[in-house]
């Protein structure tokens, strides 16, 4: 137990909240990780996050004057992260917003524009808002060059108004329609979102010196960054049984043209949850003890899920090995990881991670418990995926683990 990981010492900066993102870990984890590493003799010049999500670690690393390298397979995540780590000139933002707003009211639509509308979009949106969103996106593309970093700012704003302007059930982790939802007006939502992002950007939290920040899209196991790369890795790997992030981000994936079918994003995720790749017997035999025991237990009752879990464990082992490769000598890795459960089988993700680190050659490995403050009072989820105090509902974990290790 180490209570320093439970709560932050101050409020998060508004830039962290410009776009909703499920399961984002709190910003103070990164700032405390930096303190922890430096107190333990790590000279941190470059921080990496191999599952960087919406850029929480990236923002805090840059804020503290560190270089940063990060990657994520989700293009929506990397878009948000790139916007969060960029400071924009307010006068330019205001000028572009006025131009986009004027263009929205004057732009004309063609049949070709409507032909691009995905059937899945038609499922989630009313016809009136589909037309408004098409006009808004076209206005952004007409008024802001694709080469301009400002276009990403406005596309990020566009992305975050998609759920409130759709029939998506608010604050649900599951993709489901709310037939009684009062759907918001597109331009009204966009103006509110622009004001929120503009206000957050006005608080320039980054130091004047130019720190290198590079955020790339892709599966960490398929990317070949320079080696060694970082002094400190701060990251939160996906869980063995996690939310369907491809489904959760489907509105942005479809509207921004990142995918015609959001399920395509799953194919290259850690563990390859769609079951395209069958784990070999030799791969399974080489799994650390917790991985092999979990696989054998699941195999007795859920063979398909057992194969999925085995693929995940294999990829996490490769991930830990690659973390060794990109760390500088004496560098540190810090994983934020929680345990999960499938039916009656406990999945000890954190314990498995420790085993992989031991086999890979990390030393001074520590596993510390962190209480998740938002889940202490509401440790259950209802059928719609919302947190609740109702003890008759499915219990969720209200703690997770900070796992650290050093490279020799």
Image (cartoon, rainbow, N blue to C red):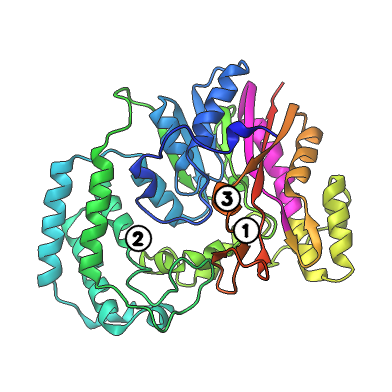
Residue 225 picture location, percent across and down: 55, 36
Q: Nearer the viewer, residue 245 or 39?
A: 39
Reading the chain from its start, which is encountered first: label 2 or label 1?
2
Which circle marks residue 219 in the picture?
3
Q: Nearer the viewer, residue 42 or 110?
A: 42
Label 3 crowd (10 A; few <14 / some 14-19 / many >=20): some
Q: Which segment is the magenta one?
A: 312-340
Residue 96 picture location, percent across and down: 15, 52
Q: Secondary structure at mark 3?
A: loop
Residue 148 visible in the shown view? no
Q: Nearer the viewer, residue 236 or 324?
A: 236
Which circle marks residue 379 in the picture?
1
Label 1 crowd (10 A; few <14 / some 14-19 / many >=20): many
Q: Nearer the viewer, mark 3 or mark 1?
A: 1
Which circle marks residue 160 in the picture?
2
Q: CA distance from mark 2 to mark 1?
A: 27 Å
Report which quarter residue 260 is drawn in.
Answer: bottom left
Q: Secondary structure at mark 2?
A: helix
Horizontal side of 280 relative to 235 (left or right) equals right
Quadrant housing the N terminus? top right
Reading the chain from its start, which is encountered first: label 3 or label 1?
3
Report which quarter residue 352 is drawn in.
Answer: top right
Residue shown at 70% from the left, 56% from the top = 240
Residue shown at 32% from the left, 78% from the top = 182
Q: CA distance from mark 3 to mark 2?
A: 24 Å
């Amino acid at each position: 137990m180490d209570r320093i990981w439970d709560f932050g010492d101050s409020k998060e900066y508004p830039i962290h909240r410009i776009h909703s993102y499920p399961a984002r870990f709190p910003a103070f984890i990164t700032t405390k990780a930096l303190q922890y590493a430096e107190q333990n003799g790590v000279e941190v010049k470059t921080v990496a996050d191999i599952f960087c999500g919406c850029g929480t670690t990236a923002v805090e690393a840059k804020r503290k004057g560190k270089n940063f390298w990060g990657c994520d397979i989700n293009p929506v995540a990397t878009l948000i992260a790139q916007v969060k780590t960029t400071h924009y000139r307010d006068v330019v933002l205001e000028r572009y917003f006025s131009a986009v707003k004027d263009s929205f009211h004057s732009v004309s639509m063609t049949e070709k524009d409507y032909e691009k509308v995905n059937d899945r979009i038609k499922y989630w949106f009313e016809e009136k808002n589909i037309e408004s969103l098409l006009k808004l996106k076209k206005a952004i593309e007409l008024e802001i060059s694709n080469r301009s970093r400002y276009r990403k700012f406005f596309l990020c704003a566009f992305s975050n108004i998609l759920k409130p302007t759709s029939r998506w059930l608010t604050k649900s982790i599951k993709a489901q329609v709310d037939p009684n939802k009062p759907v918001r007006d597109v331009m009204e939502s966009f103006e509110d979102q622009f004001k929120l992002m503009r206000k957050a950007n006005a608080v320039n939290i980054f130091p004047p010196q130019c720190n290198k920040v590079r955020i790339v899209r892709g599966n960490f196991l398929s990317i070949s960054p320079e080696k060694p790369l970082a002094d400190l890795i701060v990251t939160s790997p996906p869980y063995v049984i996690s939310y369907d992030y491809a489904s959760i981000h489907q509105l942005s994936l479809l509207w921004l043209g990142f995918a015609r079918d959001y399920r395509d994003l799953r194919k290259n995720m850690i563990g390859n949850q769609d079951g395209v790749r069958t784990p070999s017997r030799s791969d399974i035999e080489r799994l650390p003890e917790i991985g092999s025991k979990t696989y054998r237990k699941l195999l007795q009752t859920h063979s398909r899920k057992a194969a999925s879990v085995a693929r995940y464990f294999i990829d996490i082992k490769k991930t830990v090995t690659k973390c060794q490769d990109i760390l500088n000598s004496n560098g540190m890795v810090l994983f934020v990881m929680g345990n999960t459960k499938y039916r009656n089988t406990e999945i000890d993700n954190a314990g498995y991670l420790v085993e992989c680190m031991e086999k890979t050659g990390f030393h001074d490995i520590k596993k510390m418990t962190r209480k998740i403050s938002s889940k202490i009072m509401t440790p259950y989820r209802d059928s719609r995926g919302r947190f609740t105090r109702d003890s008759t509902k499915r219990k969720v974990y209200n703690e997770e683990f900070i796992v650290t290790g050093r490279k020799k």
